[in-house]
Image (cartoon, coloured by chain):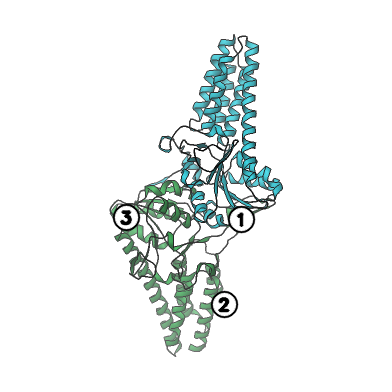
Chain colours: A green, B cyan
Amino acid sequence: VGSERLERAGLDEITADRERGASELARRCLALLAQHARRAPAADADALHAAARAYAHALQGARPSMIPIQNLLERWLASLDAMPRNLEGARSYLESQAHLLIERSRRAVTQAAEHAVALLAPESTLITHSLSSTIREVFRLAAPKGVRAIVTESRPRCEGRALAEHLSTLGVATEYLTDAQMGAFVGQADLAIVGADTVLYDGSAVNKAGTRLLALAARDVGVPFYVCYESPKLCRALPHEVPLEEMAPAELGAPGLAHVTPRNVYFEVTPARLITGWITEHGVCVEWGRTP
Amino acid sequence: VGSERLERAGLDEITADRERGASELARRCLALLAQHARRAPAADADALHAAARAYAHALQGARPSMIPIQNLLERWLASLDAMPRNLEGARSYLESQAHLLIERSRRAVTQAAEHAVALLAPESTLITHSLSSTIREVFRLAAPKGVRAIVTESRPRCEGRALAEHLSTLGVATEYLTDAQMGAFVGQADLAIVGADTVLYDGSAVNKAGTRLLALAARDVGVPFYVCYESPKLCRALPHEVPLEEMAPAELGAPGLAHVTPRNVYFEVTPARLITGWITEHGVCVEWGRTP
């Protein structure tokens, strides 16, 4: 029962989260798996193995469209085979594998951000949309270069506010816009850069609704548009195979009206043809399929 | 003093209004001028003439970037020269000239909407952004054809809600989106259509921020993008000569943060090259400068 309660709390947290990006949530899932490996009641290593596997699958199933959760937990599941056969050893092993993957993922984020920052001239202006832990990292590393930021609120949940708070802390001069103003301001930026929830097999990027608009507006005024992410976000699916999560329409705060259906599709696909470059921990790729 | 109070109330109303479009406000200005001509204290026709002219100029100055206000009030001012020389006759004349211009403007809106509706196949889907009295009229006339609508909330003030209420009353099946979702949904529309606050000398359209994004997204998926307006919205200015009103940043509801400047530029210019056609009371023009 203790194990079930532990698992339920974790699953509820992951299911309900609307704030964190896919990578951050994937790392949180790994932390939950580490905690579970340490604490879950189990008679022996086999029982722990079964419980750990079931919990990892449940966490994957909680957010099926979040590819980093699928990929990072798959890597952790793959490590189960090499698990020691004694219970205490198994607990420590599973815990350390989870922490290793968390650490590797964090390092990939930082490395991807470093490659992005290398593209920036001092005092350049970056425009972004929504919130991404990778983009937070880009700004953390770029702040000493005197960069400026243009950020969008990102309706309906206004994750852009959290980014604005981060930028305020970093002392980065920031303009904060409604999403609708992206087209009017993109011309003032030197570079547009966004994170991604997933990057698909054809190089198109799944990210918060509005990303495609930023890409279109950037291209129209000749501002390069980059996607910056760590490689566990890569996925073998093509755009038509990707389910795009729709959230509660109540988040729009629209009045209930006959014949009127509020829509709240969080994510959209930005096609590869609108993307200037893909930035990962491995470097900058400006032609899809050519690894840097 | 009675006259001053009358004028002040009207000027305050026009200055403060954030709901009505430029044409509706222009008609409201004419109604205020009619009321003023009827009621303003004046010793004789000359005094009335001077007071009416001053009030019209003050109303023009209240919203300098709203071209229909400039144009319709200019027409009304031009009619002052033919004013009868007796006070009662002058009052009636100015009142009826204002009502004539209001009526003509309303008819132009309906005629422009009729030309737009003629483009629509039955049961087609229209996507629009923000609120425009012309687009309200398009939907009123198109509702019997079984059209469907995709509308945006139009942050920060969400004028799209008023449009959704109108569509609900008309029984038009409507999807209501955040502005950020425009790019994801535009492909489901047969036609994109927006009103305009002003149409500039080069055919570019000044309209609520987000219009340019809709035009870009529509072009990208091959959906035609029309601007529908009555001709008093035409203006001899070019894009770089147009002041774009910025409203109170507090409307974004963003927290006050060091280094972060919320921006609230209401309007933006959508260049003529992104516009498929211009629809006025005179018909549909698909090449700028070639009157229909």
* Residue B291 to residue B128: above or below: above
**Front label number (2 vs 1):** 1
The disc label shown at residue A4, or none: 2
Q: Chain of mark 3?
A: A
**Front label number (3 vs 2):** 3
Q: What residue is disc 1 on?
A: A250
Q: Are marks 1 and 3 on the same chain?
A: yes
Q: Is residue B40 left or right of residue A279?
A: right
Q: Residue at horizontal 45%, vertical 87%?
A: A81
Say few, some or many: other residues with alpha carbon within 10 Å of mark 1 (under 14 / 14 to 19 / 20 or more): few
Mark 1 vs 3, N-terminal side: 3
The disc label shown at residue A105, or none: none
Furthest residue in direction bottom, as rendered? A85
Q: Residue at horizontal 50%, vertical 89%?
A: A46
Res B31 → quadrant: top right
* Residue B274 to residue A42: above or below: above
Q: Are marks 3 and 2 in contact (CB under 8 Å)?
A: no
Q: Chain of mark 2?
A: A
Q: Identity of the amino acid at label 3?
A: Ala
Judged from the image, the secondary structure of the residue bearing numbered disc 2 is: helix
Q: What residue is disc 3 on?
A: A143
Q: Choose between A165 and B239: the one closer to the eye.
A: B239
Q: Identity of the amino acid at label 2?
A: Glu
Say few, some or many: other residues with alpha carbon within 10 Å of mark 3 (under 14 / 14 to 19 / 20 or more): many
Say few, some or many: other residues with alpha carbon within 10 Å of mark 2 (under 14 / 14 to 19 / 20 or more): few
Q: Are marks 3 and 2 on the same chain?
A: yes
Residue A130: x and y in percent read 46, 56
Mark 2 vs 1, N-terminal side: 2
Quadrant containing the C terminus of chain A is bottom left
Q: Are marks 1 and 3 in contact (CB under 8 Å)?
A: no
Residue A5: x and y in percent read 56, 75
